């Protein structure tokens, strides 16, 4: 009887722990620099086929490691990545300066901090549909590299 | 050559006699070594490769109480090559729920603290995270006549990481859930050994 109580308390405490720890909270997009994985999760919560999504055009600050071959911002902890591109309001000199800053940067091993606006797109296959996002850059000042580790 | 044979025969006889008498002796404690493979995972990380652990249990009444140290290893393949180590020291309680001469079936509850080390040499990236860890495990033990027993385990391993805005701002990714299946071996100690 005593053993059964111990077991019951043990299982109950695991369930309580799990319930207390798994509460969701809202992500603030433009305060601290968020990770790529956090942003992907945040964007994918929006339902498909409903436009515009609530975060469309909002300012976001994201950090990750840059892949200049494909213009991707990567989370090297798990391989997630997000596309970065230039905003349509950016003229040719602005576009050039952004690409130069990324390509000519010799410290790509460092963490890349990006500020931009969010644009949504849908990715679907036969079974499901997911809302994804990409980051649009406005100027070369929206990017910087820093090693904090 | 003759002497070697005699020594070998005598040692076999002694071992067999000891092993036989041990069946009737009361098991007091054990040291174990186990290896498991995560089957399901819900976490920020991906592709857990294996979990290895060792521990000690002492019998107190019908319960086994002990401590263990487990390590889970994960490696992200491809260009990233990020390695993640989970170090999980725990305090455990085991409760027998079924037993016969050949097999026992036990349920284990463990509580501890997890330290997670993330490294990527290519990007000169390293990070250290910590959090509480709990485990619920079913252990199917096969009893042998020797000092070693073998067992199968299936467990649910839960880690809740401390808050760190640089790591994640979502509570969702502070939770790490793992369901693993594995095997283990334990070395038994009897009351006689300790006298």
Image: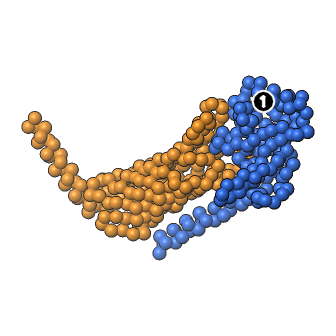
Chain colours: A blue, B orange
Q: Is residue A33 above or below residue A68?
A: below
Q: Note whether residue B91 is visible.
A: no
Direction front: furthest residue? A126
Classify the position of the C terminus of chain A by image quarter: top right
Residue B31 as seen in the image, left or right of residue B46: left
Mark 1, Cα crowd under 10 Å, few <14 / some 14-19 / many 20+, is many
Q: Residue at x 67, y 52 (%)?
A: B174
Q: How many marks?
A: 1
Residue A99's x, y, as percent?
81, 30
Where does label 1 land, which residue?
A102
Residue B5's x, y, as percent?
12, 40
Residue B48 as seen in the image, left or right of residue B6: right
Q: Is residue A69 above or below residue B39?
A: above
Q: Residue at x 55, y 55 (%)?
A: B40
Residue B106's x, y, as percent?
43, 64
Q: Residue at x 70, y 54 (%)?
A: A124
Q: Which of these two is toward me, B126 or B109?
A: B126
Residue A47: image quadrant is bottom right
Q: Note whether residue A136 is visible.
A: yes
């Amino acid at each position: 009887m005593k053993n059964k109580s111990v077991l019951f308390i043990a299982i109950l405490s695991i369930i309580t722990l799990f319930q207390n720890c798994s509460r969701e909270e809202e992500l603030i997009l433009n305060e601290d620099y968020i990770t790529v994985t956090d942003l992907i999760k945040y964007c994918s919560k929006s339902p498909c086929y409903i436009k515009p999504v609530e975060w469309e055009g909002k300012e976001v600050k994201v950090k990750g490691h840059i892949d200049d071959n494909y213009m991707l911002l990567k989370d090297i902890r798990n391989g997630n990545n997000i596309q970065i591109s230039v905003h349509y309001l950016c003229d040719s000199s602005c576009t050039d300066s952004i690409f130069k800053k990324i390509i000519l940067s010799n410290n790509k091993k460092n963490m890349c901090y990006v500020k931009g606006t969010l644009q949504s797109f849908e990715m679907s296959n036969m079974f499901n549909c997911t809302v994804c996002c990409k980051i649009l850059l406005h100027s070369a000042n929206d990017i910087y590299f820093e090693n904090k580790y | 050559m003759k002497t070697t044979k005699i020594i070998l025969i005598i040692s076999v006889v002694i071992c067999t006699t000891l092993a036989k008498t041990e069946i009737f002796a009361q098991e007091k404690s054990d040291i174990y070594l186990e290896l498991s493979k995560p089957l399901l995972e819900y976490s920020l990380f991906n592709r857990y490769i294996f979990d290895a652990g060792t521990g000690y249990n002492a019998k107190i009444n019908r319960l086994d109480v002990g401590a263990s140290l487990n390590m889970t290893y994960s490696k992200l393949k491809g260009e990233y090559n990020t390695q993640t180590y989970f170090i999980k020291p725990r305090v455990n309680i085991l409760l027998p729920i079924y037993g016969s001469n050949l097999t026992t079936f036990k349920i284990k509850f463990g509580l501890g603290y997890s330290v997670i080390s993330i490294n990527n040499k290519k990007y000169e990236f390293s990070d250290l995270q910590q959090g509480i860890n709990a485990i619920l495990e079913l252990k199917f033990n096969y009893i042998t006549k020797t000092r070693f027993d073998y067992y199968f385990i299936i467990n649910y391993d839960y880690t809740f990481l401390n808050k760190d805005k640089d790591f994640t701002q979502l509570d969702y990714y502070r939770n790490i859930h793992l369901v693993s299946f594995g095997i283990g071996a334990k070395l038994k100690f009897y009351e006689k050994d300790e006298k």
